[in-house]
């Protein structure tokens, strides 16, 4: 009788453990589905092309698009930044001097053009700073501001890397992009 009760008790415990593990897998599956809906990879043909061409990791490009416009190609900020990667027309004109192209400002609404120039700009900033935190800060606040911050010992560590961002909006922007990169890597790029 004791043996039968112990066997039943063991069966119940094993069943609870198996059910718990299955529930965990189901929860993770559902959570990943929700995350994939919230962190899509729209415009992947352009992201893959220009990320490869300019040496910028795809999760970085997707994270900037997600943070800047949430994949709305018609987005325009209060400051006048346009399109998926929210490029200022002045920045677009400046970048075109480097690519030796001549396009109309309205082309910033075109997803391919916007992703090309946004990714090119990220690549330029990475070559300039060599650190994604500085790149994202410069993408948001402008490289002149980041250059000033890097010269101020109040904002940098002993290696000259930016550790304090004086603009709250830019500090939050860097956190958002970094979080989005982590989500994109987890959902799409980790085996």
Image (cartoon, helix red, strand yellow):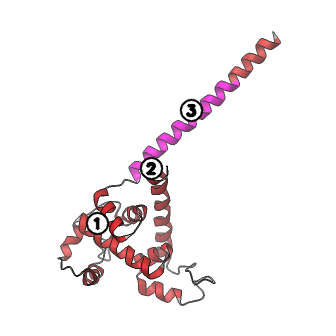
Tag shown at residue 22: 3
* Image-based side of 171 in relation to 62, left or right: right
| Tag 1 residue | 75
In the rendered structure, which segment of residues is drawn in magenta? 13-38
Q: Residue at x 24, y 69 (%)?
A: 113
Q: Dot 2: what SS?
A: helix
What crowding class fits label 1: few (fewer than 14 Cα within 10 Å), some (14-19), or many (20 or more)? some
Camera-nearest residue between 145 and 14 = 14
Q: Residue at x 60, y 29 (%)?
A: 19
Camera-nearest residue between 80 and 151 = 151
| Tag 2 residue | 35
The image quadrant where one finds the N terminus is top right
Q: Quadrant of residue 93?
A: bottom left
Which percent across, then down, holds residue 31? 48, 44
Which of pointers 2 and 1 lies earlier in the amino acid sequence? 2
Which of pointers 3 and 1 lies earlier in the amino acid sequence? 3
Q: Dot 1: what SS?
A: loop
| In this rendering, the label closer to the viewer, 2 or 1 | 2
User: What separation in Å lies between label 2 and label 1 (alpha carbons)?
Assistant: 22 Å
| In this rendering, the label closer to the viewer, 3 or 1 | 3
What crowding class fits label 3: few (fewer than 14 Cα within 10 Å), some (14-19), or many (20 or more)? few
């Amino acid at each position: 009788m004791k043996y039968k009760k112990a066997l039943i008790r063991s069966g119940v415990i094993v069943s609870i453990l198996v059910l718990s593990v299955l529930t965990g897998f189901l929860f993770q599956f559902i959570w990943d589905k929700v995350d994939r809906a919230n962190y899509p990879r729209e415009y992947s043909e352009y992201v893959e092309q220009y990320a490869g061409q300019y040496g910028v990791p795809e999760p970085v490009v997707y994270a900037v698009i997600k943070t800047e416009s949430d994949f709305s190609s018609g987005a325009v900020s209060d400051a006048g930044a346009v399109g998926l990667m929210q490029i200022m027309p002045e920045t677009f004109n400046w970048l075109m001097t480097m690519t030796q192209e001549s396009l109309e400002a309205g082309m910033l609404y075109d997803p391919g053009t916007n992703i090309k120039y946004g990714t090119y700009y990220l690549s330029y900033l990475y070559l300039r700073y060599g650190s994604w935190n500085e790149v994202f800060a410069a993408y948001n606040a402008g490289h002149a501001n980041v250059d000033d911050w890097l010269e101020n010992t109040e904002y940098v560590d002993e290696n000259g890397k930016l550790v304090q961002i004086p603009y709250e909006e830019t500090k939050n922007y860097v956190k958002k992009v970094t979080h989005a990169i982590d989500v994109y890597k987890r959902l799409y790029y980790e085996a």
